[in-house]
Amino acid sequence: MIDKGFDVVAIDSEKIAFDLMLKRPEIIKQRAHLKTIQSMFQNLDFASLPFVDVVLASFSLPFCPPKYFNEFWKNLVSKIKLGGYFIGNTFDLGFTKFKSSTDMTFHDKQQTLDLFKDFNIIHFEEVKKESKENGQFEHFYIIFAQKK
Ligand SMILES: C[S@@+](CC[C@H](N)C(=O)[O-])C[C@H]1O[C@@H](n2cnc3c(N)ncnc32)[C@H](O)[C@@H]1O
């Protein structure tokens, strides 16, 4: 995203995520265009976050616990400018690796589509496949949508 000319706010709960990212030469070069926030999604101070052109949430939203998800999602959507984009994933309960986690939020196909009532969906894909890990299945959705 930085290489494409965006200013980026990167959010993750784990310090190691930033430690790894900040070692990358292409990131070091463009450090002025990157702000990092170490926070759990559910604890984010949305008032201090900018309005954004794109939210890129790959394989991350489901890690917000169910108790906080609706509020978190409402706040996240409110920060996308009209005409801005969401790119990311939701996980179905058929994603067996995570199935027993009570701290994660799962959405089936209809529940995923319901999240995007304020968006035009540009690309929607259901991925259902055997995982590389033995006996596990991956079942998730890929969403590319534009806020109305
Ligand atoms: C499966 S990784 C995905 C990382 C990256 N987006 C990607 O696509 O490669 C999930 C990330 O979510 C972070 N995470 C897990 N629970 C979180 C939470 N409650 N709030 C914020 N980040 C969280 C983890 O530290 C991890 O970096």
Image: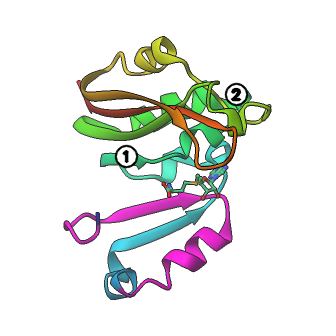
Query: Does the magenta-highlighted stretch encompass residue 6?
Result: yes
- Residue located at (66% from left, 58% from top): 13
Q: Helix, strand, or loop for circle 1?
A: strand
Neighbours of disc 2 within 10 Å: few (<14), some (14-19), many (20+): some
Point out residue 72 in the picture as x, y percentages from the top left corner. 57, 34
For mark 1, what is the residue?
A: 55
Q: Using residue 73 as the reference point, say whether residue 51 is left or right of it.
A: left
Point out residue 86 in the picture as x, y percentages from the top left corner. 34, 38
Who is closer to the viewer here, 140 or 63? 140
Q: Quadrant of residue 66?
A: top right
Mark number displayed over residue 66: 2
Magenta region? 2-25
Who is closer to the viewer here, 10 or 63? 63
- Residue located at (58% from left, 43% from top): 131
Q: Helix, strand, or loop for circle 2?
A: helix
Point out residue 21 in the picture as x, y percentages from the top left corner. 50, 75
- Residue located at (56% from left, 63% from top): 37
